[in-house]
Image (tube, helix red, strand yellow):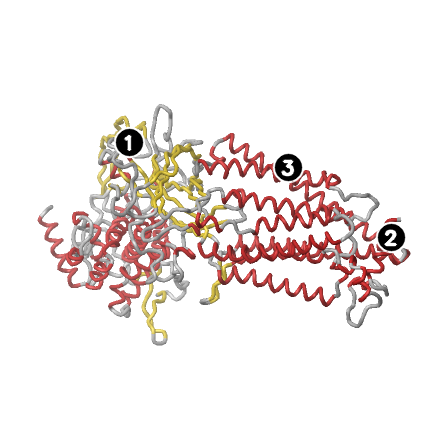
Amino acid sequence: MSPRYSLRSLLLVILAAFSANASNWLYLAKLSSVGSISEEETCEKLKGLIQRQVQMCKRNLEVMDSVRRGAQLAIEECQYQFRNRRWNCSTLDTLPVFGKVVTQGTREAAFVYAISSAGVAFAVTRACSSGELDKCGCDRTVHGVSPQGFQWSGCSDNIAYGVAFSQSFVDVRERSKGASSSRALMNLHNNEAGRKAILNNMRVECKCHGVSGSCEVKTCWKAMPPFRKVGNVLKEKFDGATEVEQRKIGSTKVLVPKNSQFKPHTDEDLVYLDSSPDFCDHDLKNGVLGTSGRQCNKTSKAIDGCELMCCGRGFHTEEVEVVERCSCKFHWCCFVKCKQCHRVVEMHTCR
Amino acid sequence: MAGAIIENMSTKKLCLVGGILLIFQVIAFLVGGLIAPSPTTAVPYLSVKCVDIWKNHHKTKWLMPWGLNKCEKIRDLDEAMSRQIEANDIVFAVHIPLPNKEMSSWFQFMLVILQLDIAFKKNNEIKDNAEVTLDVSLAYRDDMSSDWKEMAHAIETRKLKCTFASPKTIEHEGRYYDCDVLPLMEIGTVAHKFYLINIRLPVNERKLTNVGIGEIKDIRLVSIHQNGGFTKVWFAMKTFLTPSIFIIMVWYWRRIKMMTRAPVLLEKVIFALGISMTFINIPVEWFSIGFDWTWMLLFGDIRQGIFYAMLLSFWIIFCGEHMMDQNERNRLSGYWKQVGPIAVGAFCLFIFDMCERGVQLKNPFYSIWTTDVGTELAMAFIIVAGICLCLYFLFLCFMVFQVFRNISGKQSSLPAMSKARRLHYEGLIFRFKFLMLITLACAAMTIIFFIVSQVTEGHWKWGDFTVQVNSAFFTGIYGMWNLYVFALMFLYAPSHKNYGEDQSNGDLGINTGDELQLTTTITHVDGPTEVYKLARKEAQE
């Protein structure tokens, strides 16, 4: 690590200490060295959690591994979805995880909040179905429960628990501030939009099992979409996000589109308050890494094309020999036997 | 079958009976809609990927996904790659039910469905007609501390039917295929508290097993069982209905035995219908609570099959006996053309059911649909049964048409007939039209409710108030056919005004007061019984 980089990191940590950043808990994703979170003391040591999140951690120890997994999923998916854009969701090893871009009310922040709350809901639900958690579905403290229990009428869907947990864990920061500032409203909205991206894309699957397998009796259930699908949905919402401002209607403060000619946003849409920087130049103050040194596509006219990606600074071209795996033989898991093929490709990197 | 109760009953009494039956019908719907929970529950499971480290030591055969002796698990298969774990060492483990829950014999049956999450990879696509070979085993135990006991073990193949919605390019790598759900297993009783499923996907390149099935990311299972609450409501209903139908059946047969003549075919068929209804009603399922009778599911299918066959035969014979032409039927052999298809169809479905659920008694993982020959055989049985059903309905419609044609023919010549003959025919027409009406009503109700329950979500909500539509459908329709059989035996039993010579003297003669006889819709002055005696004499001559 270069001294400049460490200096920047240090600066960012200091910055983070002053700016309230509700996505700091995503730092959990970076804590793979901690091992499993199985003792209450570990909760205290986790960086990035606010006091109430630490309390939740202590009360729900078994869920914390899933929260961490959710954070990792969210970051991986964010990086996949933004791989071809100027801002590529790169993370730092410090707080805040995404640099300062996300502490402002930008589009990118909207996406990060949405994908991370979705990630937690997703990971917790998955953990529920694999039996890692004790109190999913049939837990009476979370809504959507049958009063008579599993034997009488079965349990409610695990997704209800996952979403409820995501609500109470991820949203707690905004709620503790009293949900009055426009940032808090934006974050809450985007968190909810992330969870809606899962809920509204649940696949309904059915099975007929009547007499001789006829459809006289049919049972349907809801299956969670793959996380890639959630990422795709949210990326679309990112592209069509609405710029909003806070207005007071009656005694409550709400977010309304800045341009009154636009359709009001729905629960599923992402909203943002501030316009994003262009992410072109290395900007220490705002934690923008810049696009210099990024690979680009010479033929593309879109954002991954060299024209746009390099912000008009031009690009280097060099011929590189890449070693690729080819004519492979696969098993369904864990076994790949390939030949090595050498290929010369042109690689373009931004100046 | 001259002089059934229905003809000799006053409108008022008939309405009263109808009203009472309607009340019971409404109760049947409400019991399902308000008391019972939804009929079945589906519980999704995500299998845990265990590493079979004891493979060569035989320490324990069973791998637990969670709990005290949980297996060594890997989070995803990329981890397995880096740790150089082979495909053959990975076991997908699922514990049914989820933690802190117990299965119960009130669940009646359990079927498990398999779903594979297969990621698309450009150079590791799913091959055409790919088949996945599963080495599955099922174990059970009744308390958390005891050892697992093996219940079944099999090596099964399932066809992969997957589609990929996006274009197959590098950019879309990592997206999942849309794969059809695969049936995994079916057990007819849930006699144990805990079940454990271990699935292996052995790879053998020489035999080409599990080669070209893409990159499997996860195995998800869904278990479906009947809800305990629904079972209890269902049992309660059966326990109540059995004596009701049984008593009316005994009463009906006694009435027939009291007559001087031998029972005619139609009376026998109605009685047989009552027997098959009672056969369905008898709540033998109570035994499934105490005993591990895996054949209960199959037995239930057989009972239902017998009832359907009986009901269909009854409709044909009822039409035939009201044909009002000169042919003497009154023999089952006279209906071979119509009853034949029912018998063939029912037999085909029986064979099919034996091949599917019958074999599942031995091997719960068996499914007839997994092999090509099996699929063709199953389709053949179902198609033959379908053809038989169509044939049957053609015959039935034709017969109903014939009856109506004869009715209109008779109606035009009615005024010219002698009084006794006229009343005989009027009785026949009325009986036929009445049954036609309630049968159509019942069939329409069944179809409407079936469609509603297929189309809508399982329950309707108004605030805190939930109505379980699916449960209401089951209890309501079941109650309805019971009431249908009940009403049939009650209304079509021979009238006592007919056989009790001395009894009938009392209320013989002119109708008294408001007791307007139903048959009087077409004018006549005398009491019907006298007329029927005449009619019978005339017929004998």
Badge 3 crowding class, 10 Å Cα cut-off, few under 14, some 14 to 19, many 20 or more, is some
Distance, label 3 to label 1, CA atoms, is 53 Å
Judge depth for marks 1 and 2 and give the one in front.
2
> Which residue occupies 36% across, 76% down?
A250
Q: Which amino acid type is marked by label 2?
A: Lys
Q: Which amino acid type is marked by label 3?
A: Val
Question: Could you tell whether B407 is left or right of B467 in the image?
Answer: right
Against B414, residue A185 (above or below) is below
Q: Position of residue B20 (x, y in %)?
A: 64, 65
The dot on residue B344 is 3
> Which residue occupies 58% across, 48% down?
B279
Q: Is residue B316 visible?
A: yes
Q: Position of residue B214 (x, y in %)?
A: 36, 35
Q: Which amino acid type is marked by label 1?
A: Phe
Q: Is residue A308 visible?
A: no
Instruction: Indicate the secondary structure of the residue bearing disc 2.
Output: helix
Mark 1 belongs to which subunit?
A
Distance, label 3 to label 2, CA atoms, is 41 Å
The dot on residue A335 is 1
Tell me, yes or no, whether dots 1 and 2 are on the same chain. no
Whichever of labels 3 and 2 marks the residue nearer the N terminus, that label is 3
Question: Could you tell whether B149 is left or right of B5 in the image?
Answer: left
Judge depth for marks 3 and 2 and give the one in front.
2
Against B392, residue A140 (above or below) is below
Instruction: Indicate the secondary structure of the residue bearing disc 3.
Output: helix
Tell me, yes or no, whether dots 3 and 1 are on the same chain. no
> Which residue occupies 52% across, 34% down?
B375
